[in-house]
Amino acid sequence: MPYSLILNEHNFSVETNVSESHLQGTIGEKNYDVNFHPVDDHHIQMIVNGKCINAFVSASEKGKTVVLNGRSYWIQDADQLEQNEMQSSGLQKEVNCVTPPMPAIVISVGVHSGDTVKKGQAVVVVSAMKMETTLVSPFDGLVRGVNVKEGDKVMPGDVLIDIEQTSE
C-alpha cells in the first residue's frame, strides 16, 4: 500500500505490506523488514532488518511523535493532511461511508444492509498491530451496503460500509 508521509517536514513515498505483526516496506530505494509487538498504547518493540528497536509513540490531531533510540521524529500522513484541509474548506463531499484509518484486518461487522444506524454507533471492528479499533457511523442513517466480512484485509480508502444519511 503506498503512502505519502512527511517526516520532520520532508516528504517521503512509502510502500508497505502489513500483516498482523509483520511489515515489509520501502522508503526510496531502501527496503525494511519489520516484526513488531505493541507493549502498550505508546510503546512498540520492533526488529527492523535484524536490529531490535523500541519505539515510543505519542499521537496528536495532526500527526505523531515517534522516539527511536533517543531521537524524536515528527510524522504526518500527507494524504490525511490534504483530506483534513479539504474538509475544513468545505471542498470534500459529505462522508457517506466507513473506511479504515490504516491497513487492518476486519474482526467483526456489526451491521447488515438495510439496518438503521445512529451517529457514533459501532459498525465495524478492525485490528492493526494487535490493537482493535471500532469504526462508527458518522451520522444517523440507513446502511446501503456492507462490503466486508470477518477476516478480510482492508486498507485506508477501502469502503467497508456505505451509509445514507437520514437526518441532520
Image (spheres, rainbow, N blue to C red):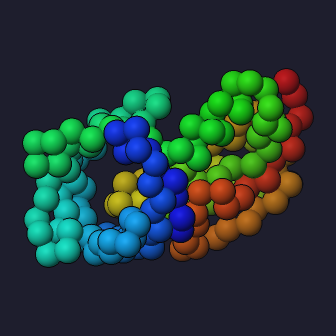
Instruction: Pinpoint residue 90: horizontal percent, then vertical percent.
Output: 78, 26
Left/right of residue 108 with respect to residue 6 in the rendered view: right
Left/right of residue 22 with respect to residue 77 in the rendered view: left
Q: Where, by quadrant of the figure, is residue 35 drawn?
A: bottom left
Figure check: 15 above or below 60: below
Q: Where, by quadrant of the figure, is residue 67 drawn?
A: top left
Residue at (39% x, 65% y) in the render: 27
Seen from the viewer's position, the closer of residues 130 and 22 is 22
- Number of labels in the image equals 0
Instruction: Pinpoint residue 73: horizontal percent, then vertical percent.
Output: 27, 41
Instruction: Pinpoint residue 1: horizontal percent, then vertical percent.
Output: 53, 68
Seen from the viewer's position, the closer of residues 10 and 161 is 10
Residue at (65% x, 39% y) in the render: 83
Instruction: Pinpoint residue 19: horizontal percent, then vertical percent.
Output: 41, 73
Figure check: 110 above or below 18: above
Residue at (45% x, 73% y) in the render: 17
Left/right of residue 85 with respect to residue 130 in the rendered view: right
Seen from the viewer's position, the closer of residues 65 and 26 is 26
Is residue 20 something that shows in the picture?
no
Residue at (11% x, 65% y) in the render: 52
Is residue 40 something that shows in the picture?
yes
Q: Where, by quadrant of the figure, is residue 75 drawn?
A: top left
Left/right of residue 70 with respect to residue 67 in the rendered view: left
- Image quadrant containing the C terminus: top right
Figure check: 149 above or below 38: below
